[in-house]
Image: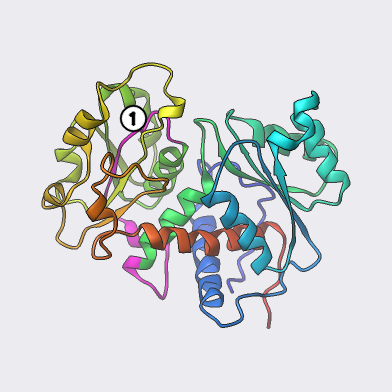
Amino acid sequence: MPTTTWNRRHVLSLADFSSQEYDTVLQTAGSFREVLSRRLKKVPTLQGQLVANLFFEPSTRTRSSFELAAKRLSADTLNFAASSSSLTKGETILDTAKTYLAMGTDMMVIRHKQAGVPQAIAMEMDRLGAKVGVLNAGDGQHEHPSQGLLDLFTICCILDSNNPRLSLLEGKKIAIVGDILHSRVARSNIWSLTASGAEVHLAAPPTLLPQLFAECGENRPGKLFLHYSVEPALQDADFVMTLRLQKERMEQNLLPSLREYHQLFGITRERLKMCKSNVKVLHPGPVNRGVEISSDLMDDPEFSLISQQVTSGVAVRMALLYLMGGGKAEK
């Protein structure tokens, strides 16, 4: 287990993560990946601590992954469901958080459809002097840090399974294709991948890729490029990350049709011929089969890293909870 000191109480964004912090997460996740391969997949590092999963928005992968990660670390868990909570009676989000604080919560994992809610809860915890760590599990169109970190970990493990580290991505070309506008995953991945020195190429229809995204690449070790057709993004790419069309967040008709989107931006075997011969494909899920990616390609282990992303998610979230919770490695 890495011995690097971790001073971050909250994980709300990857925008200000240092190279050392990325490597600490990657190396710690690598250690927990080994734990998850054992017959006994549990360690006592957070025994006695309480992790509250406050999901104000539906989730399957992220919520289950955080709950399993906490349990693998021997922490106790509390799961919140907005539909059956006192929010329906008029209670505020901050009051809900303070209720869980009064129950003895040590860490809060927050997901909300509005950007800034995890930060607001973290500020309230700090104002109260509570030593509670807040982890952003996705807020509106802002960020999804743990997904960005697990994607980074998945890619780094492909490049060096024994020693995943940020520097492995320097000079690599990574294409991110799809609904950039509404994707908090894309934002977190842009921060992490440009921090590594990679070339990040965003590709989407103009309605889903505003020019303001170009600002994310300023003053970063890596380079960021915007494309309104998929071909230049895929040309000689080492990795391709395709994103779900978030129809639930689209308030206007931003696309003519899903069929036309697939014809122009869908990732298929034919399109992958433009990439490096050993290209790998990622998708944060859930997947609209036959829209963002062809169904046969999604299930092809030669190209698809989708199942590895899910597995990586548990190890990375164990690493984050361990680091935030002040866990101590076993001698």
Furthest toward the top, the residue is: 252
Of residues 213 and 33, which is closer to you in this image?
Answer: 33
Q: Work out whether 260 lies above or below 33.
A: above
Where, quadrant-wise, is the N terminus in this rendering? bottom right
Q: Work out whether 61 lies above or below 316.
A: above
Look at the image and say whether residue 172 sits in the magenta stretch.
yes
Furthest toward the front, the residue is: 84
Residue found 53% across the figure and 66% down from its top: 29
Colour setting: rainbow
Where, quadrant-wise, is the C terminus in this rendering? bottom right
Give x and y (percent) for residue 170: 31, 56
Of residues 316 and 170, which is closer to you in this image?
Answer: 316
Q: Is residue 155 left or right of residue 108?
A: left
Give x and y (percent) for residue 201: 26, 40
Q: Could you tell me which secondary element the residue under label 1 belongs to? A: helix
Q: Is residue 88 left or right of residue 186?
A: right
Q: Is residue 141 left or right of residue 289?
A: right
* Residue 255 falls in image quadrant: top left
Q: Which residues are magenta?
A: 158-183
Q: Which residue is mark 1?
A: 214
Q: Work out whether 211 lies above or below 176.
A: above
Mark 1, other Cα within 10 Å: few <14 / some 14–19 / many ≥20: some
Residue found 80% across the figure and 51% down from its top: 105
Look at the image and say whether residue 130 sits in the magenta stretch.
no
Of residues 263 and 3, which is closer to you in this image?
Answer: 263
Amino acid under label 1? Ala
Residue found 42% across the figure and 72% down from its top: 163
Of residues 169 and 42, which is closer to you in this image?
Answer: 42
Give x and y (percent) for residue 74: 72, 69
